[in-house]
Amino acid sequence: MRFTSRGVARDPEPWLSEDGNYRAPDENHRPAPWAIKRMPYHWAPRPEYNVPVNPILVDIRIYRAARREMNNPKGWEHVLRKFERAIKGTSGPWTDATAEHVVHARKVLTHLANLEALHG
């Protein structure tokens, strides 16, 4: 499964017309007035654009932001070690995370730590 650490991804064309065509919203987040006059549209975002959020990565983003605000940022290697210690316990901060969340977060954090080591 695919996850994100930010808010849920949105369908770029969530409005569906009676003839089965999707339309992007205008600046008011609605179908354009001229399109509505032609035929009715209803809100029908496509499910493939609704990416679930990984709660572990959300917490890590919050942790990293707090460290930057304290003017004491920690590298991804540190975050990866902290993550590995936290998931070994049975009462850690992510007791509601699934095994899929853990595998995904480990893959993302390992990749970021490797990139940081490579590029400094």
Image (tube, rainbow, N blue to C red):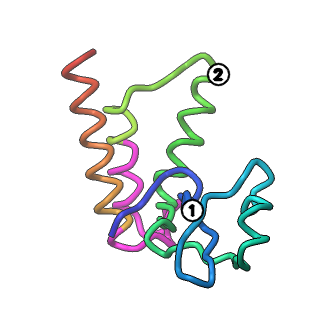
**Residue 71 figure quarter:** top right
Spatial CA distance of label 2 from label 1 is 40 Å
Residue 21: percent from the left, percent from the top? 53, 73
Query: Could you say whether the residue bearing mark 1 is in a helix, strand or loop?
Result: loop
Which residue extends farthest front?
A: 38
User: In the rendered image, which quarter contains the N terminus?
Assistant: bottom left
Residue placed at 76% from the left, 61% from the top?
A: 34
The residue where tag 1 is placed is 13
Residue 63: percent from the left, percent from the top? 56, 39
> Vertically, is 45 above or below 111?
below
Disc 2 or disc 1, which is closer to the eye?
Answer: 1
Amino acid type, residue under disc 1 in the picture: Glu
Residue placed at 30% from the left, 36% from the top?
A: 112
Residue 90: percent from the left, percent from the top? 42, 69
Amino acid type, residue under disc 2 in the picture: Met
Within-10-Å neighbours for mark 2: few <14, some 14–19, many 20+: few
* 52 displayed left or right of 41: left
The residue where tag 2 is placed is 70
Of label 2 and label 1, which has the lower sequence position? Answer: 1
Residue 102: say if magenta: no
Query: Could you say whether the residue bearing mark 2 is in a helix, strand or loop?
Result: loop
Q: Which residues are magenta?
A: 82-100
Within-10-Å neighbours for mark 1: few <14, some 14–19, many 20+: some
> Vertically, is 59 above or below 61?
below
**Residue 40 figure quarter:** bottom right
Give yes or no for contact between labels 2 and 1 (Cβ–Cβ under 8 Å): no
